[in-house]
Amino acid sequence: MQLYPGIEVGPGGELLVGGLKALDLARTFGTPLYVYVEDAIRWKAREYLKELRRISVPADVAYASKAYLSLRMARVAGEEGLWLDVASAGEFFLATKAGFPPERILFHGNNKSPEELKMAIKNGVGRIVADSLAEIKRIQEIASALGRTQAVLIRVAPGIDPHTHKALATGRIDSKFGIPVYRGAHIEAVRLALKMKNVRFMGFHCHVGSQIFERRWFELAGKTMGAIYEDCLKAAGVFPEECDMGGGLGVAYVPEDKELSIGEYCEALVGSFRDRLSNLGLPMPRIFIEPGRSIVAQAGITLYKVGTIKRLPSGQKLLAVDGGMADNPRPMLYSAKYRCLLARQAREGQLSYRVVGKNCEEGDTLIEEAFLPMVRTGDILAVMVTGAYHYSMSSNYNALPRPGVVHVYEGRAFPVVRRQTYRDLLDEQIEGTDRLALASNMGQF
């Protein structure tokens, strides 16, 4: 029985990941462990490209790397013909060290430093998504000093609130991102960019939010961007060559989440933009979309080992695992909900457990109520749909080493990010040689 692409229940009831037993992966690579079915990631990337070709628009897909980035993931994106969306110099650095072509990178961020901009421009970044008037001026100054002309998209806040989680709604007029479409501020930005000799204005960028399940918000975004392009032609005398529509397609984490298909999403977002321009008699610019979560989320699981199991005075059973909020902060940040299964018996059961982590926070709860068969200490627990914003948001809280990352591709499992060791925790410390010597003599460390 398939649970997600590449993740299924085997004939003996065990959990299979890319055709391999989750139990074997845990034994081989340890826990906690992030596991990705690379075949599923590649399939999702191809599905996006296929659907954009189907609706016949000139378009590119830029993978939003903040969802999950490793050297291997950057190579996968490159091999599948994607662009990359990066949000920091660190992401840009990782991508280019993986051999990803810098000319296929879009550089985002609401507060890029001069050093970040210099790194990107000097190394041939494809597009910089300018977030403010001040940044447009900064790009001009740096590009001029380097003797370059830099292609730029101007990010706008279109004033759309898709009623997702407050922390994920990025299209509102008062968002920290972009230039608000308010009293002509976006047109002022265009006029400024057109004056800059070393800035090439390519078009606009918008992103209305993440984890959106309703088609109407994407349709509204497309129509709104069509109106903005009409406005730009009338007010600034230029029709932009490109339009980046962002991402935002919601992903089902639990059965009650009802997600749109990739085809429905592309038709709603890009199709509505195309239809609006067609009604105005305007040509279709080159489109970018930026899926991240929807490419990797369901391709990933996290494997934990069960430790303490106890019954609370309320009667609830509490099940503690060897990870927690340090490797998955989303339940605390967004009240995110998850589903989990036992690796040895991958089905829901009749017993109710609260799944908690080992971090020193009462709020370190991964799943408020999970229905499982009888769980034993030492069991391997698999939390589903953890491919997006888990490894990338993990931390060393309580000085816990970060988990390793494993990909499964074409039936073979291999590590792509090394599990941190206790020794790694010392690398950034500058307390002096005496303490380092003491730590090196501690046997298990």
Image (cartoon, helix red, strand yellow):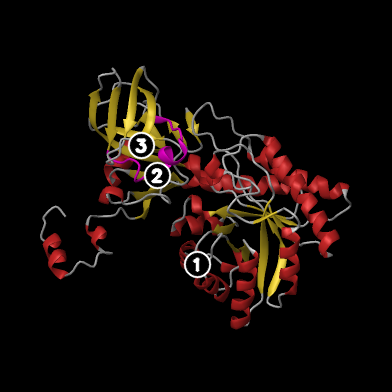
Do the CB atoms of the residues marked 1 and 2 lie less than 8 Å apart? no
Q: CA distance from mark 1 to mark 2?
A: 24 Å
Using residue 137 as the reference point, say whether residue 443 is left or right of it: left
Using residue 29 as the reference point, say whether residue 100 is left or right of it: right
User: Residue 161 location in percent, x, y?
Assistant: 64, 41
Tell me the amino acid under the disc marked 2.
Val
- Say which of marks 3 and 2 sits in front: 2
Task: Judge by depth and name the residue closer to the eye, 75 or 113.
Answer: 113
Label 1 element class: helix
Q: Is residue 165 above or below residue 127?
A: above
* Residue shown at 76% from the left, 57% from the top: 184
Mark number, residue 35: 2
Mark number, residue 21: 3
Do the CB atoms of the residues marked 3 and 2 lie less than 8 Å apart? no
* Residue shown at 34% from the left, 36% from the top: 363
* Residue shown at 56% from the left, 59% from the top: 110
User: Residue 388 location in percent, x, y?
Assistant: 47, 45
Identify the image quadrant of residue 193: bottom right
Start-end of magenta stretch: 322-340
**Sequence order check: which comes first, mark 1 or mark 2?**
2
Name, please, the residue furthest toward the right: 281
Q: Residues within 10 Å of mark 1 (few under 14, many from 20)?
A: some
Residue under pointer 1: 96
Tell me the amino acid under the disc marked 3.
Lys
Magenta region, main secondary structure: loop
Judge whether residue 173 can be spotted in this image: yes
Label 2 element class: strand
